[in-house]
Image: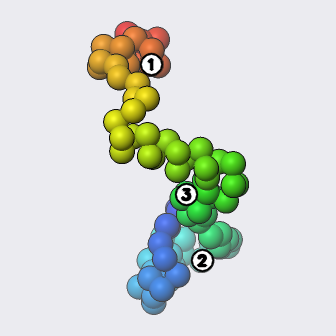
Amino acid sequence: MEAIYKLKANEINPNLMGTIKKLFGSKEITITITTETDETEYLTSNPVNKKQLLDAIKEVKKNKNLIRFTGKGVRQNSLFSVFS
């Protein structure tokens, strides 16, 4: 059995520990803690990528260089068309 809990560190409380104990009983478990990378931080960590993103945001705000398409075009070019 596997259970994944995604929460902030300050949300860890005795109730969570009780829930884990109820789910797994006396079985041996492994608890692994990882931090989530903020998507905006990650995308802007590279200076070249950051400039491209900021330039693209400016273009959108100016309503320039937008690509427009219909819902039909999306369906034709998506995985859904494979299964239809």
The mark nearer the N terminus, 2 or 1, is 2
- Which residue is denoted by mark 3 in the rendering? 39
Outermost left residue: 71
| Circle 1 SS class | loop
Q: CA distance from mark 3 to mark 2?
A: 37 Å
Q: Nearer the viewer, residue 9 or 48?
A: 48
Residue 2 visible at all: no
Q: How is the image coloured?
A: rainbow
- Which residue is denoted by mark 2 in the rendering? 26
Left or right: residue 66 compared with residue 23: left
Kindly identify the residue that appears in the image at 55 percent across and 57 percent down.
39
Q: Position of residue 37 (x, y in %)?
A: 60, 63
**Residue type pointed to by label 2:** Ser
**Residue type pointed to by label 1:** Ser
| Circle 2 SS class | loop
Instruction: Point out the frontmost of discs 2 and 1.
Output: 1
The mark nearer the N terminus, 3 or 1, is 3
The vertical placement of 81 against 29, above or below, is: above
- Which residue is denoted by mark 1 in the rendering? 78
| Circle 3 SS class | helix
Q: Position of residue 63 (x, y in %)?
A: 34, 36
Label 1, residues with CA under 10 Å away: few <14, some 14-19, many ≥20: few
